[in-house]
Image (cartoon, rainbow, N blue to C red):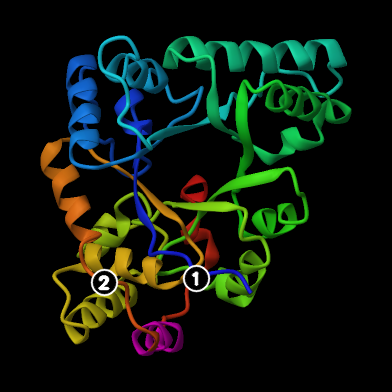
């Protein structure tokens, strides 16, 4: 039996530090200097993992400037997780040569932006790339890994089903998955038991606040078609009160940390105040077994489209 994981830690997401971001509302987009200063402040406060991607606008470049190895290197034990360009511009019938070249271009651009010759983790931003072009892109990634340019390979899953399916692949060592306190799909799929059998896979959660929707106290702040919004808002508020927590943000984080199979929770921030507030959420203990069971038993019903911002 694998050893129990420590409660999930904070991972700084960089998408909104590199590009205009947000479905219902646009997050405040910082200047280059503001973003660099915020990343450095995060490291100074103990953040040791940073999540980025080739197509997050200027995010990789800003991380590279923040942690220039020659002048301001990352603290020991830190690592940056990035993602291969999704390569949507490539035709489905592109040749193997073209597919390999596209992967090489993406990896090279990430290395240049991040000012490194080694990428600790590279994930597929879209899992279709695993089999696209007769597996040519995937084979090139494996070659980069075997050459030591990439440390580990992973996937960024869109659905629980995608993540579970890739657990059968021994080359996958890292996953990013969408999950939050509303999401019962992972429990239905027995995710805890499945991931326990792959203890060598690091799992990061994203969308932990559902792009901030969970923190909205009025239905007007939720997606327009969400008829269940009033019931969900009331449920979150009731749980927060019953558990004696400081707010819905604390509830959302403590719930995910109570699941036991997540290693990190990815969250973006717009300024230092948000950074400090997010880090404080990780100072509180995870929810206990009784509280977790109560959540699973009382979660209101709603349509699953709410869990996918792409469908809003």
Judging from the image, what secondary structure is the residue with disc 2 in?
Answer: loop
Q: What residue did someone put label 1 on? A: 4
Q: Is residue 29 left or right of residue 4?
A: left
* Location of residue 75 with respect to 240 vertically, above or below: above
Judging from the image, what secondary structure is the residue with disc 1 in?
Answer: loop
The reply to whether residue 226 is visible in this rendering is yes
Magenta segment boundaries in residue numbering: 290-298
**Quarter holding residue 295:** bottom left
The reply to whether residue 223 is visible in this rendering is no
* Location of residue 52 with respect to 220 vertically, above or below: above
Q: Residue 84: image x %, image y %? A: 60, 26
Q: What secondary structure is the magenta-colored segment mainly? A: helix
Residue nearer the viewer, 214 or 154: 154
Q: Could you say which disc has been placed on residue 285 in the image?
A: 2
Q: Residue 120: image x %, image y %? A: 53, 31
Q: Residue 44: image x %, image y %? A: 18, 35
The residue furthest front is: 76
Q: Is residue 303 left or right of residue 155?
A: left
Quarter that holds the N terminus: bottom right
Q: Within 10 Å of the Cα at label 2, are there few (<14), some (14-19), or many (20+) other Cα atoms?
A: some
């Amino acid at each position: 039996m694998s050893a129990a994981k420590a409660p999930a830690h904070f991972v700084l997401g960089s998408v909104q530090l590199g590009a205009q971001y947000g479905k219902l509302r646009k997050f405040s987009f910082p200047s280059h200097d503001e973003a660099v200063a915020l990343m450095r402040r995060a490291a100074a406060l103990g953040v040791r993992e940073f999540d980025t991607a080739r197509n997050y606008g200027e995010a990789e470049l800003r991380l590279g400037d923040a942690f220039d190895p020659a002048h301001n290197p990352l603290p020991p034990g830190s690592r940056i997780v990035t993602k291969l360009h999704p390569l949507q511009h490539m035709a489905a019938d592109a040749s193997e040569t073209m597919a390999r070249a596209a992967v090489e271009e993406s990896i090279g651009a990430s290395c240049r932006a991040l000012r490194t010759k080694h990428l600790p983790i590279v994930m597929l931003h879209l899992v279709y790339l695993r089999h696209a072009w007769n597996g040519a892109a995937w084979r090139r990634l494996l070659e980069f890994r075997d050459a030591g340019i990439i440390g580990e390979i992973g996937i960024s899953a869109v659905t629980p089903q995608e993540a579970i399916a890739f657990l059968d692949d021994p080359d996958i060592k890292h996953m990013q998955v969408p999950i939050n306190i509303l999401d019962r799909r992972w429990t239905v799929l027995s995710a805890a038991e499945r991931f326990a059998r792959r203890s060598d896979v690091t799992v990061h959660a994203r969308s932990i606040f559902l792009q901030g929707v969970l923190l909205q106290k009025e239905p007007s702040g939720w997606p327009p078609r969400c008829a269940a919004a009033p019931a969900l808002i009331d449920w979150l508020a009731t749980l927060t009160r019953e558990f004696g927590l400081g707010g819905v943000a604390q509830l959302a984080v403590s719930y995910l940390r109570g699941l036991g199979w997540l290693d990190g929770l990815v969250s973006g921030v717009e300024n230092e105040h948000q950074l400090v507030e997010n880090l404080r959420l990780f100072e509180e203990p995870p929810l206990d077994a009784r509280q977790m069971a109560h959540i699973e038993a009382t979660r209101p019903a709603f349509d699953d489209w709410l869990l996918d911002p792409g469908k809003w």
